[in-house]
Every structure is written in structure tokens, then in C-alpha cells.
Image: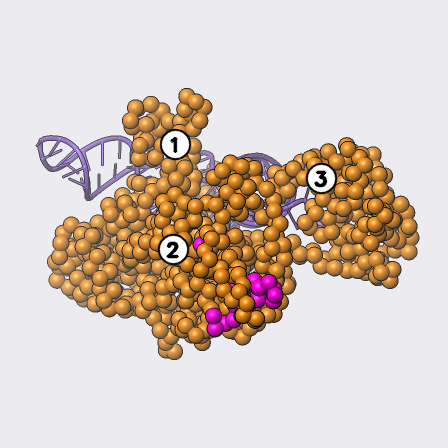
RNA sequence: GCCGGGAUGGCGGAAUUGGUAGACGCAGCGGACUCAAAAUCCGCCGCCGCGAGGUGUGGGGGUUCGAGUCCCCCUCCCGGCACCA
């Protein structure tokens, strides 16, 4: 056994062992509970980044821990292989996306293996493989049959120079990212999935997910955005060229129908037909509408923006009072939500109140609360309170509370055929068509005679040609006659294939079910899926809190309704890991721009206490600005390549540091010296193992006392805490527990009588097992070298021995009036009165009694402290 | 603006139910070894104070024998969002 810690050799040889013994290949085992541990699969962008290392180390620690606890663990891995970056790389390097992607997969797979993850590589998949995406197409066709998938026109970002559709992230300040040309909005046909049909289930079933972070569930609920209210119409006789607009009805949606008698105006969106009509004869209004359309719609920072509006001069008729109500255009009304028009009740809506005051519109109270008085002077909280208010100035509805009033008013509107209760959702249907090459082809054939014809199942998959090289000017599939030209499955005449591909969120919506399946080529999933699913632990970035997770939940429910699977929710427990941050250093350039420096080009300047006071560039010795910590990124030049970390310190060090530096859900701040500290620790572990291997083994003595007993107690107490921490997924304190154990072992006195070797071997075997999920290579090697066994993965997870935790004498802290004043050592068996008596007699307590105070009360917390209240 | 999460030494972070605040590590300081350096090992390390002691978990109040932890108010930071009728 080598004295130096030979991390390269042992990591390579351990990985080789795992590979030849197929250590992580897994099949269903009726004798063991299953544990499906899944990390979000990576996009094969070229090489791993630190976020991947963190994500997959968390998953691997959980997998190995559960395996040693007796679970049959499935931990698969694959590739989210379709997507835009491959096309961008093709434009730059003139390499087909397929080749680029497969090359990247090869490299990244090597990297993942070098990190020693316990992955069942037999289940590897890439979403760009026809065997996989065939089933995207197959399920899409089933959805089409059931009406879940349908076609309508969609608005896209169009680059007029490249003649191509742009993704949102390719639009920078309203211009194409490559051409700089102003982006146009174009309407083109595309396919949609009716996710809104599942909105209620997606909302309700969040309650079935106690293992999800509360904030993710809140984000999903907000995104789904259920809103219960009343949809009703104001009537009018407004005509454009004699043609009645919208059949003479201005539809609005409201959650506060109980305030309907307080309506004093209506507000419509800039795109609303009534606004368009009024603008024709009113240049001022037309200008205002143009301004509204330009305003960014979805930014949160315009929440505080000035509410503006303009009168259209048009009026509509209130459905219950028959009064004429003016119609305004408001910059705060969105065409895309509800009806694009709202009723305004300034007395009971804070926003309408401000608007009415600004434009001197009437305000009419229609709700009252006992003990409060209404005043136009200022908005009061109770004006909008639907829990306390009752109707007033509302004729027959006076005195009714919120629910009763809404019911009565909705019924009256319904009787007039002018409205009814309605549920509105913020969630929109999922548009899946992408005018992109590198994606799963949508299996549709366009025939001049028969229209849009689904590709028959037996012709699936519609294979994507893998030799195209996009050049930025539109989808290259449009120029591939061998792909496009086909015959109509219905009439046999020449026809054209659809060239749109699917959103890549489709690919990632069911990969977890495919991993768990037997990879049959005659079925999307087989019965094995139901054995492993649902996923017991899903781990990934918070950035997928809404879309990916919502789409996956939706896709699962569709698969369930088609009888393919038997679970409602795919992911039982979700862990959202924090991002990896690093220092950002920069300097203003002469030209006024900002130049960034990599952390290794910079040296920190400390004061005499070690406090960082500044930073300077190594190259010129002059100061640079420290901009704080930020996500690792190319543009800020603060990324750290995991490969260099692995090369220099080894996988175990990388893994240990990732676990040690922060709890999994928090952001992790990169620190070179922290990495060195982790490496130092593993070197000490190795050195201790090396020293112990030279000692003759001895048994644990029957009765321990003094220093050896303390060392053993420290080990077992630390283990107890570490097991608790593992189950609450706080791995940073598990890592520190292994450090504490080593500290205790190194302190253990090596005297002849104490049989210290027995304690050391027991303690070190506990340390190795506790450390093994985090640093599997070094622990496996030492486990075998020290003769504990062949395979640490087969070892039982260590449990603390209660007898080791018992102390004959305990230290009790003494407080006077809650303040720490001293301590005393007493026998564990000492009873309460004796403890009280002993405590009061201590000099540190007597001191406070001398000034004439007397003992008022004594609080004894067993095994912890005594608090003497003196007054 | 609304919703969610935070604030603990020079830094990252500990502290199951209210019970010795600062575990573990990093940085810093001192020492040993060395011709020297690196590596390694030992010691110190919240702040004020020579010391006794005082003080201290963003700020203010409260409950309690006792509060980082519970309650009320405030400030700041981070994340999410939908001007959602």
C-alpha cells in the first residue's frame, strides 16, 4: 500500500472494477424495496460544467446511500440531445448537428464515468435516436385522435433577413441575434396540445406531492392561475361600416361580480376591436394605442408603471341597470387574458380607483362594511375586501354577502342570456411546433386532396436526416426533397411532409419512464416502468420549476389516460439544487466598457485579520473591482472547468468539496482553497488508513473508560447525527461528520493497555462507510486494503451503538438568571434535588447570593444545564 | 406591486423539540520540522478589555427561568410573477 494518496490510480482501477463487474446494472428485485433516483439529464453541449457535477454528485450520494441501506437502486443517465445549440454550432463550424451532438455525448460520457457515478449505463438513451423519438411521434398521433393535439395559427418571431423563425432567446432588444434586423411578428400554422384541459388535475394533484418544495408548487399553481368568476356582456349597437361589432356584445370577465352595480366605465385592451374602430376617427387615440402596443407586456417592473387610459367616446349598456357606460382604452388591460376587456369599479378596485381619480371618472360605492365609512379622499383597505363586505346601493342585491351576491347576479345575467359563471385559466395550450431542423419531426403529411394526414403507425418513425448543416437561413429540411416528397397515405398521390419539428420539452417529458422500461422497440414503455415509477427522488435545477416539470406531469397524465402507465404523478420527491457561483472581477476599460478577469488572474488583498480588502490583477499589480459572487458563465469569465479539477485533485475531491461547501438547495460558492482543504482531508484519510494497515488488529475491549471511551463516544455520537442529516439531505454536515471522526481518531491515544487498535478499526470502518457515498473510490480501496471486505457497497450501513453513547459522568452547565456562569461534572445517575443542591453550592452561584439575593427557582434540564433564578 | 425564501465571525456554513451560539472547513496569526522553501504537524482565532468582566445571531419591541429558534413591527437582500380584472 502506497504512503502517498494515489488518487489517479485508485480512481481508475476502482472504476475499472465497477465496469467489469457491472456493479450498477439493475433489474427489478422482488426481495428489495426499489429506489429510483433520477437526475435531470444533460444537454450535450460539449463538456460538463460545475452545475452538472453538483447535480449528479447529489444524485449519486443518494443512490449509494440507499443501496447500502438495502434498496434496489435505479440510477440511469441519458441525453437531452435535440435543440438549438447544435444548430448554432453547425452554423459556426459547418458540422452537422448530429455529428456534433454524438461527439459531445462521447466526451461527456467519459467525463461522467471519470467522476465515478453509480449509473446503469445499459439504460442510456439520447432523445435524438429514432428508437426514442419514434414514440414522441406515436403518442402525438394518439393525442391527435383524441383531440388533445390540434392545429391552429401561432405568432412567431420572424427574422426577415435570414427568412427564419427565432426563439425568444434569439431576439435581443427586438432584433435578430445574427442579422440585427428588426424582428417581425408573423402568424403561421402550428400544433398545440390541450394542456388546459388538464389544468384542474395539474392544480389538484399538487396536493399529492408532499415531497416537493413548497415554492415549486406555488410557482406551478400561480402559473396555472385558476380564477373563478363571471363572464358577461355589456350590449351595444356599435357598427363598423354597418357591421355590428362582436354581435353587439362587449364581453368582460370579473371575479367581483358582486360589485357590478358600482360599474362606472369599461376598459379595453389596445388591440380590442372597439379600440381599433374608435381609433379610425381619432388620431390622438390611435397614437395612444400605438404607444400601448409598444409597451412591454410581461415585465414585472411595469407593475408600478403609471396606469394610463383614453376615452373612446363609445358607450355600452349595463346589462342590469341599462345605464350607458363609457368605454376607455387602458394600458393595463391585456388582450391575451380573459376577454381583453374589463368592467371598472373604482369604488372597490384599487387600480380602478386610482384610474378614476386621475381621469375624474365617477366613483360609486356598492359595498359596505359595518363600522367603516366610505370616503373618496383616499383608498382604504376594506373597499376591496370581499370577505367582510355586503352589497349596498345595489337594488335587489342589497345586504347580500360576496358569494350570495355573485350567485344572484350570475343567475340574473344568465336569465338575460348575457353571461354566466366561468373559470378562467392563466395557463395556455402548449404550442409544440418549432420551425427548426434539429428536433423530432412532426408525423404529418400534407396532401392537396386529403389535407393534413397523420403518418400511419407502421411508417414510424419519421426519421430526421442526420446530414443536414443549417446555415441560419431557415429550416434545411425545406430544401431536402428526399425528406419532403412522399405519397399521401390516404389517396396515394404525391404529397409533402411536414418540416416542423417538436419542442424539445416533448423529449424530456417522458424520458424517465423510458429509462425504467425494458427498452422494447415495439412499445413506448412496458410493464417494468410501473415497477420503478414514480421516481423516488428527482434532482435538478430550479430553472425547471415550471415548464419541464409541468409538461412532464401533463404528459404522464395523458399516458395514464391512454392506459400506458398506472401512476398519476411522475416525481414523488423533488430536490432543487442551488447554482454554483464564483467571484466576478472586472475593470472599466478606457472606452467605457467592462473587461472581466478570470479568478486565477487575480490576487485578493487582505488586511492583518485576514479580511479581504480588495483585489489586484497579477499581470500588472493594479487593482480590479470585485463584483461579488455570480453564476459561472463564459461572458463573466468566472467558470471553472470540472475536468481540470478532476485532473488536478481527482473525482473524490471534486465530489467531497461539492457536498461540503453548502447544503444542496443553497447556492454554492466556489473556492480554490476550499477544494484544497477537501483534498487535504482525503490525504489524511489515506494516511490514517495506511498507518492503520500496519497495526495488528485487536478486539474491542469489553469495558472502556477515559480517553478511548471518549473517542468511541465521539464517533458514535457523530454517526447518529450524520444519519439524521442524511435523511434530511443535508450532506454538508455529513461531510463534516467524517472530518470530525478523523479528528477524533487522530487524537486517540495509542497506549499499550487501551486496545486502541480495536477502537480505531471500528471507528475507521464507520468513517469509511459514512464517507463512501461522497468519496467512493478512496473508501472502496481502503475498505479492501484494511480487510473489512471486498466491496464496501455490499457493507451494511453503520448504526450507532447506544451503549457507546452513555457517559458515567456528565458536564452540566450552570446558569444564573439565564446567563452562563460555570459548569460542574456530576454522576449520570445523580437525582434532581442533589443536582440543585450541588449547583447552588458552586462558587460561581454563591457569588450572586452574597449581595442579599435569594434563590427563587431552579430549572434543571436533564443532561444539559441548571438555571438558578436569583431575585 | 404581489407571492416565496433569506440576513449568524474576515469567508463558506453549524446549532432536531426554545436550553453552553459560532460545529466542520477556509483565510489569518504564532510555533515545530527544514540550510531554505514546499508539504506536514502543533497551538491561537466573534467583538471590546491587560484582566475581572462586558457584549454579541439585520434593527426595534414582546412572551419565557432561558430566544439565532416563538409572536408583533421595521430595514435590507435574493428568487418567482400575471397590471390577471
Q: Quadrant of residue A488?
A: bottom right
Instruction: Give the chain ID for the orange colour.
Output: A
CA neighbours of label 3 inside 10 A, class few (<14), some (14 to 19), many (20+): many
Q: Is residue A785 visible?
A: yes
Q: Secondary structure at mark 1?
A: strand
Co-location on one chain, circles 1 and 3: yes
Residue extending farthest to the top is A590
Q: Is residue B48 above or below residue A345?
A: above
Q: Are marks 1 and 3 in contact (CB under 8 Å)?
A: no
Q: Position of residue A2 (x, y in %)?
A: 13, 54
Residue extending farthest to the bottom is A30
Residue A861 versus residue A435: which sits nearer the camera? A435
Image side of residue A172 versus residue A245, left or right: left
The residue at the point 15 percent across, 64 percent down is: A697
Residue A116 versus residue A738: which sits nearer the camera? A116
The residue at the point 74 percent across, 59 percent down is: A422
Residue A346 versus residue A432: which sits nearer the camera? A432
Letter of the chain that mark 2 sits on in the rendering: A
Which of the two discs, 2 and 3, labels the residue nearer the N terminus? 3
Q: Position of residue A400 (x, y in %)?
A: 85, 56
Q: Which mark is residue A596?
A: 1
Instruction: Give the chain ID for the purple colour.
Output: B
Q: Which residues are magenta?
A: A436-459
Q: Is residue A756 above or below residue A267?
A: below
Question: Which residue in the structure is indicated by mark 2?
Answer: A467
The residue at the point 36 percent across, 41 percent down is: A639
Q: Position of residue A217 (x, y in %)?
A: 56, 56
Distance from the alpha carbon under mark 1 to that under mark 3: 40 Å
Q: Which mark is residue A82?
A: none
Distance from the alpha carbon under mark 2 to that under mark 3: 49 Å
Amino acid at each position: 500500500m502506497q504512503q502517498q494518496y494515489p488518487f489517479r490510480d485508485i480512481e481508475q482501477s476502482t472504476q475499472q472494477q465497477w465496469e467489469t463487474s457491472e456493479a450498477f446494472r439493475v433489474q427489478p428485485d422482488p426481495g428489495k424495496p426499489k429506489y429510483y433516483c433520477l437526475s435531470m439529464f444533460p444537454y450535450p453541449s460539449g463538456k460538463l460544467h460545475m452545475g452538472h457535477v453538483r447535480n449528479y454528485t447529489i444524485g449519486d450520494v443518494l443512490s449509494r446511500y440507499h443501496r447500502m441501506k438495502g434498496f434496489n437502486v435505479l440510477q440511469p443517465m441519458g441525453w437531452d440531445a435535440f435543440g438549438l445549440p447544435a444548430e448554432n454550432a453547425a452554423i459556426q463550424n459547418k458540422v452537422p448537428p448530429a455529428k456534433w451532438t454524438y461527439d459531445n455525448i462521447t466526451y461527456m460520457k467519459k467525463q461522467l464515468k471519470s467522476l465515478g457515478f453509480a449509473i446503469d449505463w445499459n439504460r442510456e438513451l439520447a432523445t435524438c435516436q429514432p428508437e426514442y423519438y419514434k414514440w414522441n411521434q406515436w403518442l402525438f398521433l394518439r393525442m391527435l385522435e383524441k383531440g388533445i393535439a390540434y392545429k391552429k395559427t401561432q405568432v412567431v418571431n420572424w427574422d426577415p433577413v435570414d427568412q427564419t423563425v427565432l426563439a425568444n432567446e434569439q431576439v435581443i432588444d427586438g432584433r435578430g441575434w445574427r442579422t440585427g434586423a428588426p424582428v417581425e411578428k408573423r402568424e403561421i400554422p402550428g400544433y398545440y396540445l390541450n394542456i388546459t384541459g388538464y389544468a384542474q388535475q395539474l392544480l389538484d394533484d399538487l396536493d399529492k406531492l408532499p415531497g416537493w418544495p413548497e415554492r415549486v408548487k406555488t410557482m406551478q399553481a400561480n402559473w396555472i392561475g385558476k380564477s373563478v368568476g363571471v363572464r358577461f356582456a355589456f350590449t351595444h349597437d356599435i357598427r363598423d361600416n354597418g357591421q355590428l361589432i362582436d354581435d353587439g356584445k362587449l364581453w368582460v370577465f370579473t371575479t367581483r361580480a358582486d360589485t357590478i352595480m358600482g360599474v362606472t366605465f369599461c376598459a379595453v385592451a389596445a388591440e380590442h376591436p372597439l379600440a381599433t374602430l374608435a381609433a379610425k376617427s381619432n388620431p390622438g387615440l390611435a397614437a395612444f394605442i400605438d404607444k400601448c402596443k409598444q409597451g412591454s407586456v410581461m415585465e414585472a417592473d411595469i407593475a408600478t408603471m403609471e396606469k394610463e387610459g383614453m376615452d373612446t367616446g363609445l358607450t355600452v349598456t349595463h346589462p342590469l341597470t341599462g345605464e350607458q357606460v363609457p368605454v376607455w382604452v387602458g394600458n393595463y388591460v391585456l388582450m391575451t387574458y380573459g376577454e381583453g376587456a374589463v368592467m371598472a369599479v373604482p369604488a372597490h378596485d384599487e387600480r380602478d380607483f386610482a384610474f378614476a381619480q386621475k381621469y375624474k371618472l365617477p366613483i360609486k360605492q356598492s359595498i359596505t362594511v359595518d363600522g367603516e365609512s366610505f370616503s373618496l379622499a383616499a383608498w382604504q383597505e376594506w373597499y376591496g375586501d370581499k370577505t367582510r363586505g355586503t352589497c349596498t346601493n345595489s337594488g335587489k342585491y342589497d345586504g347580500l354577502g360576496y358569494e350570495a351576491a355573485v350567485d344572484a347576479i350570475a343567475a340574473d345575467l344568465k336569465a338575460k342570456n348575457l353571461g354566466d359563471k366561468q373559470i378562467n385559466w392563466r395557463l395556455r395550450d402548449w404550442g409544440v411546433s418549432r420551425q427548426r431542423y434539429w428536433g423530432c419531426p412532426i408525423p404529418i403529411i400534407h396532401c392537396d386532396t386529403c389535407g393534413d394526414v397523420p403518418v400511419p403507425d407502421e411508417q414510424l418513425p419519421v426519421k430526421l436526416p442526420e446530414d443536414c448543416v443549417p446555415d441560419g437561413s431557415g429550416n434545411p429540411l425545406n430544401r431536402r426533397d428526399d425528406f419532403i416528397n412522399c405519397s399521401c397515405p390516404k389517396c396515394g398521390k404525391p404529397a409533402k411532409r411536414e418540416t416542423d419539428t417538436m419542442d424539445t420539452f416533448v423529449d424530456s417529458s417522458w424520458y424517465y419512464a423510458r429509462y425504467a422500461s425494458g427498452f422494447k422497440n415495439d412499445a413506448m414503455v412496458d410493464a417494468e416502468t410501473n415497477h420503478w415509477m414514480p421516481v423516488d427522488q428527482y434532482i435538478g435545477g430550479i430553472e425547471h420549476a415550471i415548464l419541464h416539470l409541468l409538461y412532464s406531469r401533463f404528459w404522464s397524465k395523458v399516458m395514464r389516460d391512454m392506459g400506458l402507465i398506472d401512476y398519476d404523478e411522475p416525481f414523488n420527491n423533488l430536490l432543487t439544487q442551488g447554482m454554483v457561483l464564483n467571484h466576478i472581477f472586472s475593470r472599466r476599460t478606457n472606452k467605457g466598457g467592462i473587461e472581466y478577469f478570470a479568478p486565477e488572474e487575480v490576487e485578493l488583498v487582505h488586511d492583518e485579520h485576514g479580511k479581504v480588502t480588495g483585489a489586484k490583477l497579477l499581470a500588472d499589480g493594479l487593482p480590479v473591482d470585485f463584483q461579488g459572487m455570480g453564476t459561472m458563465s463564459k461572458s463573466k469569465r468566472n467558470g471553472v472547468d470540472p475536468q481540470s479539477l478532476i485532473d488536478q485533485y481527482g473525482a473524490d475531491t471534486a465530489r467531497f468539496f461539492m457536498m461540503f461547501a453548502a447544503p444542496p438547495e443553497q447556492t454554492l460558492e466556489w473556492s480554490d482553497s476550499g477544494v484544497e482543504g477537501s483534498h487535504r482531508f482525503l490525504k489524511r484519510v489515506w494516511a490514517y488508513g495506511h498507518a492503520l494497515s500496519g497495526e495488528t488488529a485487536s478486539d474491542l475491549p469489553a469495558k472502556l473508560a477515559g480517553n478511548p471511551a471518549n473517542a468511541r463516544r465521539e464517533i458514535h455520537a457523530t454517526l447518529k447525527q450524520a444519519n439524521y442529516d442524511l435523511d434530511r439531505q443535508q450532506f454538508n454536515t455529513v461531510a463534516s461528520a467524517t472530518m470530525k471522526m478523523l479528528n477524533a481518531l487522530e487524537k486517540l491515544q495509542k497506549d499499550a493497555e487501551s486496545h486502541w487498535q480495536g477502537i480505531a478499526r471500528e471507528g475507521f470502518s464507520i468513517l469509511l462507510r459514512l464517507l463512501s457515498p461522497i468519496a467512493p473510490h478512496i473508501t472502496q480501496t481502503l475498505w479492501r486494503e484494511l480487510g473489512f471486505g471486498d466491496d464496501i457497497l455490499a457493507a451494511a450501513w453503520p448504526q450507532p451503538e447506544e451503549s457507546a453513547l452513555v457517559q458515567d459522568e456528565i458536564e452540566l452547565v450552570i446558569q444564573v438568571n439565564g446567563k452562563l456562569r460555570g459548569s460542574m461534572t456530576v454522576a449520570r445517575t445523580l437525582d434532581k434535588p442533589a443536582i440543585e443542591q450541588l449547583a447552588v453550592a458552586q462558587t460561581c452561584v454563591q457569588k450572586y447570593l452574597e449581595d442579599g439575593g435569594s434563590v427563587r427557582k431552579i430549572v434543571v434540564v436533564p443532561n444539559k444545564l441548571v438555571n438558578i433564578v436569583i431575585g
